[in-house]
Amino acid sequence: MKNVFVSVIALAIIILLPCRAMGQVSSTAASVGIDAKVIAPISITNTTALNFGTVSRSTASGTVILALDGTRSSTGGATVLSSSSFSAAAFSVTGENSATYSVTTPKSTDVVTLTRQNGNGETMTVTNFINNSPTSLSEAGTATFLVGATLNLGANQIAGNYTGSFSVTVAYQ
């Protein structure tokens, strides 16, 4: 009886194992689309330099401010000569039609140094950079904007021509 019972169990195991082992595996696949859009590169061109014009110095420090509305003003010991030409920096941007972008100029707290040409290391600083850039290109893929700033003259600033530069970057968003 014991042999019959063991034989029945063994037979049941033999019958059940192949059934489980023979179960079919199911798989499926899906097709996935791939998309990409290539856009025109963004570029920037400086069309007008930042020019504070001719400034008269004094024994007191002062500033010259170039505003985005095309005006110039002075404070303290700086006096602007009304006959001298001046300009906020002007830029043109080209790229993908109606694309959004950002402009990076020196921050309002950044200091750019101007050095006197043919001098002995005399300097002035430019601070408080501002711009009026739009946030997107036109339907034609263009934009223009201005950058203004503040020129800081020291008391008894040495006379001469002072030059320097600053960076402006545009990038798609």
Image (tube, grey):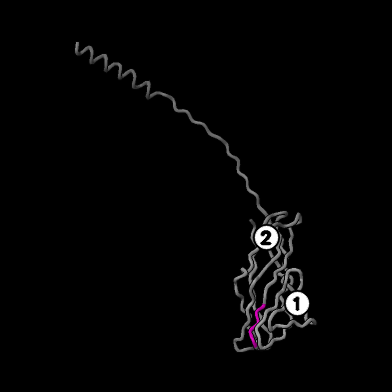
| Residue 101 percent coordinates (x, y) | 66, 58
The furthest residue to the top = 1
Q: Is residue 67 above or below residue 33?
A: below
Query: Looking at the image, how many numbered discs can be counted on the residues?
Result: 2
Q: Which of marks 1 and 2 is nearer the N terminus?
A: 2
Q: Callout 2: few (<14), some (14-19), or many (20+) C-alpha neighbours within 10 Å?
A: some
Q: Name the element at disc 2.
A: loop
Q: Callout 1: few (<14), some (14-19), or many (20+) C-alpha neighbours within 10 Å?
A: some
Q: Measuring 29% from the left and 16% from the top, which residue is drawn there?
A: 11
Q: In this view, does 88 lie above or below 62?
A: above
Magenta residues, start to end: 151-155
In the image shown, does 151 or 115 lie closer to the viewer? 151
| Residue 86 percent coordinates (x, y) | 75, 77
Residue 171 lies left or right of residue 145; in this view the side is: left
Q: Measuring 63% from the left and 70% from the top, which residue is drawn there?
A: 167
Q: Do the residues labelled 1 and 2 touch (CB within 8 Å)?
A: no
To which residue does mark 2 refer? 42
Q: Which amino acid does label 1 sit on?
A: Phe
Task: Using the rendered view, name the quadrant where residue 161 is placed.
Answer: bottom right
